Amino acid sequence: MLTEKDKAYIAEFHKVQKERNEKYMVYVKTVTPMAIGFLGIMLSLADTEKMSCMKHLFYSITITATSLGILASLITSFGEILSLTNLRNNIRDKALKLKGGIDNGNLVESDIKWFEIFHYIWVFSFVCALVSATLYSWF
């Protein structure tokens, strides 16, 4: 049986988790359009025919890393949706068990770990793109 203190901790956990998820998605929704704009500017303003070999290399790395970062951010966003869908299903199943008097435990938190890999790919790609864009501007 859960005490009032346990219920307060569970409620606080869910409150903090919800706030974290909201702020994370705002972060993703802010960075992704900026990256798309950056990619558009890089593609439209570059004169690839007059580039040196090194400059072309860093330009290519910048474009590739930015594109990979955009793709990873989209997959990360979709992973959040899948995570919330799984959590909703777990809560529904738990509520059905509680209604039947079968179970009195805590709610299980569902989380999809594979989208976290894409989060790291996303961050790594954008860091590589920024470093490469800096090197591109030097040559």
Image: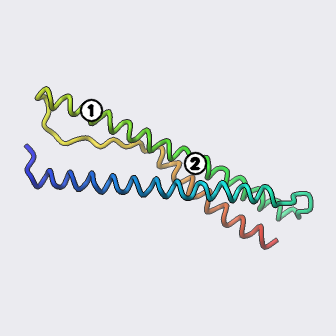
Q: Earlier in the sequence, mark 2 or mark 1?
A: 2
| Quadrant holding the C terminus | bottom right
Q: How many labels sit on residues? A: 2
The reply, left or right, for residue 134 in relation to residue 82 is: right
Q: Residues within 10 Å of mark 2 (few under 14, many from 20)?
A: many
Furthest-right residue in this view: 50
Residue under the point 61% across and 55% down:
33
x%, y% of residue 133?
72, 65
x%, y% of residue 79?
47, 42
The local secondary structure at tag 2 comes to helix
- Residue named by callout 2: 72
Image quadrant assignment for residue 112: top left
- Residue named by callout 1: 92
Q: How is the image coloured?
A: rainbow
Furthest-top residue in this view: 100
x%, y% of residue 44?
80, 56
Do the numbered discs 2 and 1 sit on residues whose CB atoms are within 8 Å? Answer: no
The local secondary structure at tag 1 comes to helix
Image quadrant assignment for residue 104: top left
Observer-nearest of 1 and 114: 1
Residue under the point 62% across and 59% down:
34
Residue under the point 44% across and 56% down:
24
Three-letter amino acid code at disc 2?
Ala
The reply, left or right, for residue 103 in relation to residue 88 is: left
Q: Residues within 10 Å of mark 1 (few under 14, many from 20)?
A: few
| Quadrant holding the N terminus | top left
x%, y% of residue 111?
37, 43
C-alpha separation, residue under disc 2 versus residue under disc 1: 30 Å
Three-letter amino acid code at disc 1?
Arg
